[in-house]
Image (cartoon, helix red, strand yellow):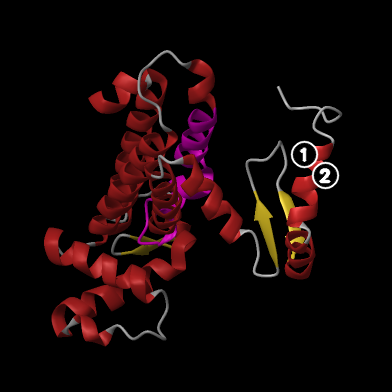
Amino acid sequence: YRWLCARSPAIAWIFAAGLILRAVAGVALFLASVYEWPIMTGLQMGGGFWTLALDARSYYDAASHAIVFGFATIEEGSASPFYVRTLAAAMWWFGISPATAVLLNVICYAASVLLLVAASGVRAAGARFIHMPIFIGIAALTFSPAMLIFGTQALKDQLCALLVIGALAGARFWWDSLDDPVQRRGLLAGGTSLLRLSVYGLGRFPVTLYKEQWARLLNHADDIKQFLQDHDHELKAKQ
């Protein structure tokens, strides 16, 4: 929290609100279902589960079974095997209970926010316009009704969000590690398309041609150089 607060107090407050909302709502719904409190009884399934998340029970049962009989029981063709393995690992560490799924979702949410801030390049509080895009993204992740509701159950949504954010953050960190502009231009040129080659850095927009067009252009390289020399006084240079 202090790390976030040093970069953006507003984001830090949203982060704290997201943690509290998920933890309190998750525990409250879990206890209400376990002890059959007279709250939305028509939606309760008992045992900590609710009809608003029917898949949660099957994920929990598969993860519990894997803890007892081994992770090999989670087959690749089964429903969401990666999430079930992750949930089983969390329950092996924290205890076999639907409440562990709530804890896992809270951890995934916290990791998502930290990755977003780290990848955004925010370094110090005060740069309001730099913070705005990441502020909106974190607010949407935090207060999305679907993410809030599903975050209280044994569902994969929060983990999937973390995986997507992690992939994007990793790409951003890798891109920032390319300090040499030539490396970045070469990366862009090679990644444009397998059908065409683009050259960046010559102007505002890239120069993109098919391979036969590049071949014809390069065949006239000497003619182009000679023309530039002969008409040097007539051609305008970019300032």
Amino acid carrying label 2: it is Phe
Q: Main secondary structure of the magenta part?
A: helix
Element on which disc 1 rests? helix
Q: Nearer the viewer, residue 187 or 48?
A: 187
In this view of the protein, which residue sits in the foreground, 104 or 9? Answer: 9
Identify which residue is drawn at 51% across, 36% down.
Answer: 137
Mark 2 secondary-structure assignment = helix
Q: Is residue 84 above or below residue 35?
A: below
The residue at the point 41 percent across, 47 percent down is 169
Taking the image as shown, residue 93 lies to the left or right of residue 197, namely left
Disc 2 vs disc 1: Cβ atoms closer than 8 Å? yes
Q: Residues within 10 Å of mark 2 (few under 14, many from 20)?
A: few
In which quadrant of the rendered image does the C terminus lie? top right
Which circle marks residue 227 in the picture? 2
Spot occupied by residue 174 in the image (x, y as percentages of width and height): 39, 49
- The amino acid type found where label 1 is placed reads Gln
Instruction: Provide the residue span drawn in magenta.
Output: 133-158
Q: Any magenta on residue 176?
A: no
Tell me the quadrant of the picture where the N terminus can be found: top left
Q: Is residue 136 magenta?
A: yes
Write down the residue under mark 1.
229
Residue 74 picture location, percent across and down: 29, 83
Q: Kindly tell me whether residue 1 is visible in this rendering.
A: no
Say whether residue 200 is left or right of residue 167.
right
